[in-house]
Image: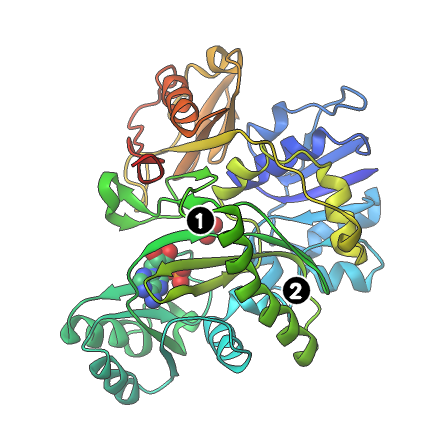
Amino acid sequence: MKLLVLGSGGREHALVWKLAHSRHVSRLWVAPGNAGTALEHLRVSGGPVENVPIAADNIEALLEFARTHHPDLTVVGPDNPLALGVVDRFQEEGFTIWGPNQRAAQFEASKAFSQEFMERHGIPTALSGVFTEPIAAKEFCARLNGRCAVKADGLALGKGVLLTSTLAEAERAVDEILVDKSFGAAGSQVVIQELLEGMEISLHALCDGRTAKLFPTAQDHKRALDGDLGLNTGGMGTYSPAPFLTDAELERVGQQILQPWLAGCAVDGIDFRGLLYPGVMLTASGPKVLEFNARFGDPETQVYLPRLENDLFELLMASVGGTLDRIDLKWSPDACVCVVAASAGYPGPVTRDKIITGLDEVAALPGVKVFHAGTAHRGGHCVTSGGRVLGVTAWAPTLASARDRAYAALDHIHFEGMQFRRDIAAKGLR
Ligand code: AMP
Ligand code: GLY
């Protein structure tokens, strides 16, 4: 089988790494990929994974590539091409592609869509309102005493959520989104939620339109600095499983969210074939969904896929084909930890083209895999080319040993300005 994977981040390197292990995959292109994806080899043939210099959201160029090379399956990593309708366009031309269609991708592309869906179908979520008018929005903020999560409706590179603790802050956040249009068209509507307290976890469920298969838990670390301080980022590290729910509790939480979600999709005629990623707060009054994403998490994928024992290609084909009910997901009992090494300045503007050293030494360590994100090959070196650069990932029988392994591996790696959090998985070890 010939596969085309879209995207260039750590998530996509993990997807490519796992798909390259599949006994079905004989050719694998990545558009555009990164320095790490280009180093992977296929288990079947030993042949290399091939990077293709096409951006993941250049749909016309991707279609042209597909017409020439006829991939048997295209796998979409990031949210942007999903929101642009890449799945619909590929399907119109008869290509098999994994990911939700444009309508189903609204769960991520529009927070207002998701919030209204959750309320209509009884999915546990924060008390909330959706507004286009600043005055009405501010009245709602006042009802919440200014303790709000103020969210731009559309995709905003993970930056469109402002958490406020006073009414003045909340009113400023509303103005920033609705009046100043700091997030452009993504801010034509605003979703305001009550500020929830509790432990935040990531859930993932692979879906085929009728069946949703829940993954184990993971926890992300969104803030830039240790102790959950600093700015919000795309994610500075993850681990799985997160020990805040027993297996039975996870099953129950999954059902509380996924059963009404599946039933709601059926009623509304939404055919979601892809990965549903609810961000969930475990509050004193039960689990509450903060948001839905319609793709694998980054860096959650980096800790899920080393634990996944199924052939990922088979899972994705079952998701596309509506046969997930016939498959059981199998997970290694190992814990897995991913620590993100980021460029100086991240999540703001970053330095680039810094030479990365130590990758060869780390490649020889057992139970360790470095997933690349913002990397490129230049002049015989692997160099930095983005904010999040590497996801140093390790697995071991206990969370503490996996954490120690990941940090021991990170000790070998260097690039100028490298920053990372030293407390990944700490909450899970307390
Ligand atoms: P979102 O993109 O909607 O997940 O929001 C980004 C981050 O903001 C989440 O990962 C949470 O850490 C935080 N957040 C979002 N909504 C809320 C809320 N209602 N209460 C508390 N924190 C929130
Ligand atoms: N881990 C955060 C995200 O993928 O959105």
Residue ID at (70%, 29%): 49
Mark 1 is surrounded, within 10 Å at the Cα level, by few (under 14), some (14 to 19) or many (20 or more) other residues, namely some
Instruction: Tell me if 157 is positioned left or right of 310 in this view.
Output: left
Residue ID at (37%, 72%): 126
Instruction: Tell me if 398 is positioned left or right of 145 in this view.
Output: right
- Indicate the position of residue 337 as horizontal and vertical percent values: 44, 32
Q: Is residue 121 above or below residue 317?
A: below
Q: What label does residue 107 carry, if any?
A: none
Give the labeled residue for mark 2.
Answer: 85
- Indicate the position of residue 366 as horizontal and vertical percent values: 53, 14
- Indicate the position of residue 212 as horizontal and vertical percent values: 66, 58
Give the labeled residue for mark 1.
Answer: 245
Element type where label 2 sits in the image: loop
- The CA distance from mark 2 to mark 1 is 36 Å
Residue ID at (41%, 78%): 188
Direction front: furthest residue: 248
Residue 417 is drawn in which quadrant?
Answer: top left
Question: Of 252 and 342, which appears nearest the observer?
Answer: 252
